[in-house]
Amino acid sequence: MTTTTVKKALVLGGSRGIGAAIVRRLAKEGMHVTFTYAASREPARALAEEVGGEAIQVDSGDCAAVSSMIDRLDALDVLVVNAGILGAGDPLVMDPNEIDRLFRININTPYHAAVAAARIMSEGGRIIFIGSTNADRTPMAGLAAYGASKAALKGMAKGLARDFGDRGITVNVVQPGPTDTDMNPGDGELKDLMHSFMAIKRHAKGSEVAAMVAWLIGIEAAMVTGAALTIDGGFSA
Ligand code: NDP
């Protein structure tokens, strides 16, 4: 930001997991936080009440609906695109429609949402995509589409950083490794395999990922743009 006061943040996919941790952290930083969700109506309602924010049901699989929702906001300082789906499996048998939906949620909507947000964003705004360490290292089978979608965010951030840089808007990717959420429970059956790839052998907490997001929106990160910041306990080291 050009000032230390940030007013309005939008988190796509904020009802659970890493997104909910980001919502809480941004609210703690003094922002008014609007967030979207797809299915978790009650957790979203409770979180909105907890942080004094607003929850809106919009499916990130519907790019046009997300863009329209952003168009209806009057102003924005921070956009965090967290909503993402995993979709792991044998590419020879996976439903191509499901792969296309993954690409819509993980690639198309982040792009269109970032562009819509930039239209209404104040000078010095912040756009952050939640990517994955799997953009850089995919040591297990079945993650080609997911890894590709997260790698796409890196190219997107680099390009949009140049497109919006003249307004001081930064565009970055935060790349978590295994993080304890419904998508990847810290006590799940793959935990030992995942930890074997890591230097620090535990799942991260959502709040640890949220802390990196909080740093990126601060004044000290004004010159960090087009970057991918990895927080993966050494998974990709
Ligand atoms: P969860 O599945 O635990 O939570 C996903 C959140 O995104 C929920 O709030 C969910 O809403 C929302 N969401 C999912 N699909 C949609 C959709 N179509 N439209 C709107 N909102 C949607 O995931 P995580 O918290 O684990 O992951 C968050 C992000 O971090 C993802 O982009 C993921 O790829 C990435 N990531 C996660 C890692 C991990 O180990 N957990 C590692 C690396 C990256 P609802 O509650 O309504 O379903």
Image: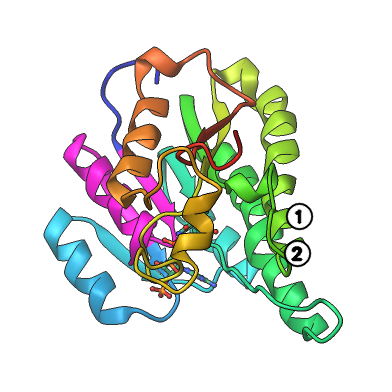
Which region of the structure is painted magenta? 8-35
Looking at the rendered structure, the kind of residue marked 2 is Ala
Tell me what residue is drawn at x 55 percent, y 43 percent: 235
User: Which of 228/218 is in front?
Assistant: 228
Q: Residue 228: x, y in percent?
A: 60, 32
Mark 2 neighbour density, 10 Å: few (under 14) some (14–19) many (20 or more): some
The stretch drawn in magenta includes residue 10: yes
Quadrant of the rendering where the N terminus is positioned: top left
Residue type, label 1: Ala
Q: Secondary structure at mark 2?
A: helix
Looking at this view, is 1 or 172 the one in front?
172
* Tag 1 near tag 2, CB within 8 Å: yes
The outermost residue toward the right is 92
Q: Spatial distance from mark 1 to mark 2, Cα to Cα?
A: 5 Å
- The number of callouts visible is 2
**For the point 38% across and 13% down, which residue is it?**
220
Q: Residue at x 21, y 64 (%)?
A: 47
Is residue 85 visible to the viewer in this orientation of the structure?
A: yes
Residue, disc 2: 145
| Place of residue 207 in the rendered image (x, y in percent of width and height, measured from the top left) | 28, 46
- Taking depth in this image into account, of 206 and 111 the one nearest to the observer is 206
Residue at 38 percent of width and 68 percent of height: 185
Q: How is the image coloured?
A: rainbow
Estimate the x, y position of residue 193 in percent, counting from the top left.
53, 61
Residue 2: in sight, yes or no? no
Q: What SS does tag 1 mark?
A: helix
Query: Which quadrant would residue 172 be assigned to in this image?
Result: top right
Please rate how many residues cluster around mark 1, counting C-alpha atoms within 10 Å: few if below 14, some from 14 to 19, many from 20: some
Task: Identify the residue under disc 1.
Answer: 148
Identify the image quadrant of the C terminus: top right
**In the image, residue 106 above or below residue 119:** below
